[in-house]
Image (cartoon, helix red, strand yellow):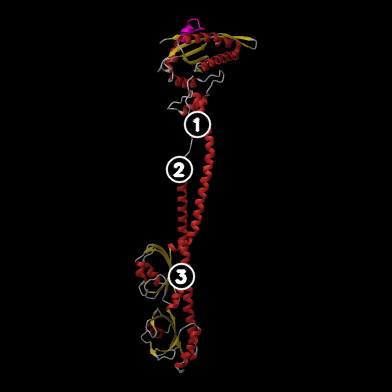
């Protein structure tokens, strides 16, 4: 008996998770990218909200300080003891010096009709050179100045609020003014801006920077700073027109390597503008912890998904292994344990669909026989004799007509049973070639003498009567034989055996003939 070659066991089937890991990694990166993009959108919205909140806070506090100063001075200016020029200035100064600390001012001063200032017992001094004093005495309107250097040292910065003193006839008899120190306004900007992580800048009536938490140079034109930036949706000239027209607004800009959102508004009763800006990096960093948490959860979800997918695939692979094992078993049956290098799995599926064996006789089908016989022919031993036998039932029509088709089926089953015995005994294969035709390949015969002995025996066994339901069904077969040589073509052998069978059928039937072509 030949040794059969072993095919690779289905347990060797593996699936690589590397592509899945790559896909999961790409999926995670896309999720993180989407989260970051969402964070960018969220940060931009937060920039707007924080800039508006900062502007609202700064504007409210500075406006409150200005308005309460105006209200206080106008209340004092309505009293005769301050607008009556007959009352000595020293009396007025004493009362004002007492009020100043109470209302939170370092000083509140009296100025007479000659624009001479009196304060805290020091020598009177002329303020006629001050532009805001000239405007006040010429127009009779209150004044709020930009920051300027004042005081005895000439370097202290402050803002001045001044209101006219009018007698009962409406004539200007002098004015009262108070000083709001530079540091006080700077503190308002700093405290309000820091809360929201924004940058606040106070711009004077001439467009100059008066105070800034963004470290912008004092006294420089704000437009010079903005012209160096890239503005979106507006230009520096358009923005300057908006500020001069006291119209509040907002704009996006790119400067110093970062994006900014800036909103601005005029302070009432002044020529000042407040600009509050929020840096994208600051806003994004505030939402970054939440983004990292969401990104971490997304990565964790991907890992869980990979774990679930791995378990699912492992479970499905068990089914795949069973299917592969089934295919390997089919290969063994079809190719007699000798799998060709060019195995066509579509052919295996086709053979499986057609059935591996004939349901009536138990032998393999024609297609399976052709595959198995072809494989066996490639391995025949040249020192041995192998033969292809074409077996034809001589009297199937007679049996069907006499005993019915059931009788014909019984006869065919009997032939199939006998042929399968010889298939196993001589390492061969038998198949049903047609309705009453069979093909049998016999191998490993010691010589033609043994072949003839086997054929003699086979003819006798195929010439018999079969008992069934009280009936005796006669069976007779003719056999055509072709000798197999190394390199023989299966279809050619079948043709030669068929030709030998034709000779037997024409010359008495019920015997065999060996072709020596």
- Identify the mark nearer the N-term, 2 or 3: 2
Residue under circle 2? 18
- Determine crowd level at label 1: few under 14, some 14-19, many 20+ residues with C-alpha closer than 10 A: few
Q: Please state the extent of the stretch shown in magenta in the rendering.
A: 500-513
Q: Is residue 335 magenta?
A: no
Percent x, y for residue 43? Answer: 46, 60
The nearer-to-camera label among 1 and 3 is: 1
Q: Is residue 144 visible?
A: no
SS at mark 3 in the image: helix
Using the numbered discs, state the Cα–Cα distance from disc 2 to disc 3 in whole angstroms: 52 Å
244, 427: nearer the viewer = 427
* Relative vertical location of residue 327 with respect to residue 439 in this rendering, above or below: below
Residue where numbered disc 1 is placed: 9
Mark 1 / mark 3, whichever is N-terminal: 1
Residue at which label 3 appears: 193
Disc 1 secondary structure class: loop
Q: Measure how far apart labels 1 and 3 are at the Cα level.
A: 74 Å
């Amino acid at each position: 008996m030949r040794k059969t070659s072993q095919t690779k066991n289905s347990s060797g089937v593996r699936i690589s998770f590397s592509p899945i890991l790559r896909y999961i990694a790409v999926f995670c990166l896309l999720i993180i990218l989407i989260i970051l993009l969402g964070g960018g959108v969220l940060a931009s919205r937060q920039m707007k909200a924080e800039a508006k909140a900062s502007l609202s806070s700064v504007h409210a506090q500075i406006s409150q300080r200005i308005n309460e100063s105006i209200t206080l001075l106008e209340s004092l200016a309505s009293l005769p003891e301050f607008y009556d020029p007959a009352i000595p200035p020293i009396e007025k100064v004493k009362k004002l010096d007492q009020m100043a600390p109470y209302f939170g001012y370092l000083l509140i001063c009296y100025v007479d009709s000659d624009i001479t200032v009196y304060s805290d017992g020091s020598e009177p001094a002329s303020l006629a050179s001050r532009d805001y004093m000239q405007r006040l005495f010429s127009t009779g309107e209150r004044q709020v100045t930009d920051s300027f250097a004042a005081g005895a040292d000439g370097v202290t910065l402050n803002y001045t609020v001044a209101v006219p003193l009018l007698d009962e006839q409406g004539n200007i008899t002098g004015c009262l003014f108070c000083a709001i120190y530079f540091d006080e306004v700077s503190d308002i900007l700093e405290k309000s801006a820091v809360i929201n992580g924004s940058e606040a800048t106070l711009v004077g009536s001439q467009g100059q920077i008066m105070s800034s938490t963004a470290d912008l140079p004092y006294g420089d034109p704000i437009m010079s700073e903005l012209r160096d930036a890239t503005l979106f949706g507006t230009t520096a000239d358009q923005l300057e027109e908006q500020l001069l027209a006291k119209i509040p607004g907002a704009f996006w800009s790119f400067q110093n390597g970062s994006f900014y959102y800036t909103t601005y508004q005029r302070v009432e009763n002044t020529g000042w503008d407040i600009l509050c800006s929020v840096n994208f990096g600051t806003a994004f960093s505030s939402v970054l912890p939440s983004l990292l948490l969401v990104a971490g959860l997304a990565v964790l979800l991907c890992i869980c998904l990979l774990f679930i997918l791995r378990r699912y695939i492992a479970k499905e692979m068990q089914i795949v292994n069973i299917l592969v094992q089934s295919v390997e078993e089919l290969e063994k049956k079809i190719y007699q344990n000798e799998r060709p290098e060019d195995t066509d799995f579509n052919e295996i599926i086709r053979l499986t669909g057609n059935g591996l064996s004939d349901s009536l006789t138990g032998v393999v089908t024609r297609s399976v026989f052709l595959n198995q016989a072809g494989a066996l022919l490639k391995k025949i031993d040249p020192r041995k004799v192998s033969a292809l036998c074409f077996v034809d039932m001589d009297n199937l029509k007679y049996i069907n007509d006499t005993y019915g088709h059931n009788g014909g089926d019984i006869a065919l089953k009997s032939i199939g049973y006998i042929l399968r015995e010889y298939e196993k005994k001589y390492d061969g294969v038998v198949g049903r070639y047609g309705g009453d035709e069979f093909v049998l390949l016999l191998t490993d015969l010691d010589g033609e003498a043994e072949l003839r002995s086997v054929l003699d025996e086979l003819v006798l066994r195929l010439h018999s009567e079969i008992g069934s339901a009280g009936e005796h069904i006669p069976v007779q077969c003719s056999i055509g034989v072709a000798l197999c040589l190394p390199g023989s073509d299966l279809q050619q052998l079948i043709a030669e055996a068929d030709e030998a069978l034709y000779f037997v059928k024409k010359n008495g039937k019920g015997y065999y003939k060996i072709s020596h072509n």
